[in-house]
Image (cartoon, coloured by chain):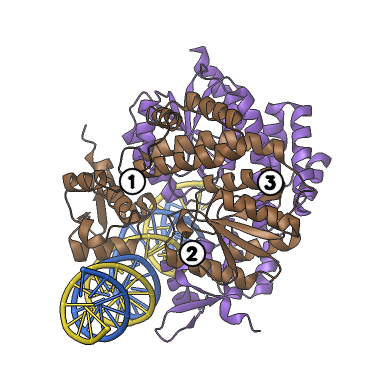
Chain colours: A purple, B brown, C yellow, D blue
DNA sequence: ACTTTTATTTGTCCATGACAACTTTGACGA
DNA sequence: TCGTCAAAGTTGTCATGGACAAATAAAAGT
């Protein structure tokens, strides 16, 4: 039984699967000759699974700074070659990090969760977050960029970290804490892991966290900030959103929120950008310090 | 200081905020004369906040079965009038459900979480899931449709349920359980609550759950199913995805997975649709029964 | 070597048109 | 009055081709 006829994806599904917009897919086809889907009788595009797979690789290279003209249209071999040559983090990971990383690559979900918990209890939560989890995230992110880790392995990893963190956050919850912080991401940003790490850090510092989950519309964040009487709104951005989108979102947030509510933005996507009235948090350590300053005054 | 200039959204942001595609927004404008955004000097559409708000109401009406020609283009008053007339659930909610519902409407996150935990421990997990959480979800869903509950309130509610459930799931985790189940949603389906409820139900029945979180590409689900040696894949669908999208996704999944791996699909979005080789789970009770049957053989 | 100007790249937007899938309406006979 | 089936209308999504601002790279000037 041939399975090829089932491995065709129309442009809408490809957009959802790869995160590359329909317009972009069509314009790439015209400019670079890839992807070049087959057409049905109505001239609709149908992408074979191989091309979708290749689009995933291309997306990774673009996310790590390459330009479309250099990567769209290359062969599978050339793409893989490029992925392997991506700039590596110089710092040599500790033995513990390597051990955790191996568990991730081996898809050992339960041993991984145990190891994470053990690591957290040995180091304490603060050090675990900044000295283990943050570098491990980088390691995973880079490996993912190079194609050494599959999406589902990354999902599996996120899930175990989330499980471990949510257990510890539950024990730290303090409804009388200060400052009162609303945590969420803007529409389009689905990455929840960074948010959980921020919640853990803030909770550890004695803040009162109100977690809204991911993808809250801007107007709703404003409403929530009002009814929950928060002192600040914490937003997390991964590399999934473009700098332009982030900037627009932050500007809208700043203008929609009352002046006395602060906005703290963090995550890899927000690295060097700055918007008037929005404080960019560069690390969890900075975050802890800032909470201390806030509480002192 | 006028704030109007900051309350303009371009078509891309409106698509992300409302979940209504760009093509659809443009074609509505032509056909029904709404939304009618202002244009900048380059003829790009910019939607005022009021129109985005109205689009949210319209989306709700469409999701509850209305047709665009009847709702797109109505005035704010007419929309609200329609929302209030939506078919109510006939069953009278119990006092306990009403109490929980009031806490949700009052944005009392902590009291809500406590009440949920108490309810769970009093009833037992199974009854809590099917007799409290499921009807409460319906109540919240309907109230949301009628506009009585804001998006952020729904987020707040989801978050508390997730917190309560993840704590109990952690205590039930059994890596030797059977069947081995992979849990996730397809790309485009971001609702995680149903998935958590399924995980809780399966865990309670003694299954071994491997949670992948939401939005896993089809090819990755297949890979994960192979490496984790699962017996079945459980997929959850909310009303957010259209029946057509669900059908395509399920067909692709069925053809991509080996025959011996079963597919169980559940959630409000999947109600009466059926695909060859995919079992549609209609309730958590049915789910428990099915696991029992599986374990018996 | 550093700044400024020019050229190229790139994603997103626009208009218009088409059509399959779905829903409603209307005609017809039992 | 009711169910059935065909015709008519509705709706989301896809297509083409063109445009342009923002971002990036290349070139020129100091």
Q: In terms of secondary structure, where does tag 3 sit?
A: loop
What is the number of the mark on residue B246?
2
**Residue furthest toward the top?**
A297
Are dots 2 and 1 in contact, CB under 8 Å?
no
Nearer the N terminus, badge 3 or badge 1?
Answer: 1
Q: Nearer the viewer, mark 3 or mark 2?
A: 3
Q: Considering depth in this image, is B177 or A260 the residue closer to the camera?
A: B177
Q: Is residue A252 visible?
A: no
Residue C9 position in % (x across, y down): 47, 67
Q: CA distance from mark 2 to mark 1?
A: 22 Å
Q: How would you rate the neighbour count of disc 2 (Cα within 10 Å): few for under 14, some for 14-19, many for 20 or more?
A: many
Nearer the N terminus, badge 2 or badge 1?
Answer: 1
Nearer the N terminus, badge 3 or badge 2?
Answer: 3
Exactly how many numbered labels are in the figure? 3
Instruction: Output the chain of dot 2.
Output: B
* Residue C12, above or below B171: below
Q: How would you rate the neighbour count of disc 1 (Cα within 10 Å): few for under 14, some for 14-19, many for 20 or more?
A: many
What is the number of the mark on residue B205?
3
């Amino acid at each position: 039984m041939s399975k090829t006829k089932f491995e065709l994806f129309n442009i809408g599904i490809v957009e959802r699967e790869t995160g590359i917009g329909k317009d972009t897919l069509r314009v790439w086809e015209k400019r670079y000759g890839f992807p070049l889907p087959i057409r049905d009788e109505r001239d609709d595009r149908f992408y074979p699974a191989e091309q979708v797979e290749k689009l995933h690789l291309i997306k990774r290279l673009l996310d790590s700074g390459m330009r479309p003209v250099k990567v769209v249209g290359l062969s599978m071999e050339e793409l893989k070659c490029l992925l392997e040559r991506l700039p590596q983090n110089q710092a040599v990971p500790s033995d513990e990090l390597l051990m955790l990383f191996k568990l991730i690559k081996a898809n050992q979900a339960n041993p991984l969760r145990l190891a994470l918990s053990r690591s957290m209890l040995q180091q304490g939560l603060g050090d675990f977050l900044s000295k283990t989890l943050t570098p491990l995230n980088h390691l995973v992110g880079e490996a993912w960029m190079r194609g050494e880790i599959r999406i589902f392995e990354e999902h599996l990893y996120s899930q175990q970290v989330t499980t471990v963190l949510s257990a510890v956050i539950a024990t730290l919850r303090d409804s009388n804490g200060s400052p009162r912080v609303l945590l969420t991401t803007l529409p389009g940003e689905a990455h929840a892991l960074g948010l959980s790490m921020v919640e853990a850090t803030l909770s550890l510092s004695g803040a009162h966290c109100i977690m809204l989950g991911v993808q809250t519309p801007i107007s709703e964040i404003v409403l929530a900030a009002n009814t929950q009487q928060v002192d600040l709104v914490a937003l997390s951005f991964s590399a999934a959103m473009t700098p332009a989108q982030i900037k627009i979102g932050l500007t809208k947030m700043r203008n929609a929120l009352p002046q006395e509510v602060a906005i703290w933005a963090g995550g890899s996507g927000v690295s060097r950008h700055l918007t008037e009235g929005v404080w960019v948090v560069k690390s969890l350590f900075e975050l802890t310090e800032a909470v201390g300053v806030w509480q002192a005054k």
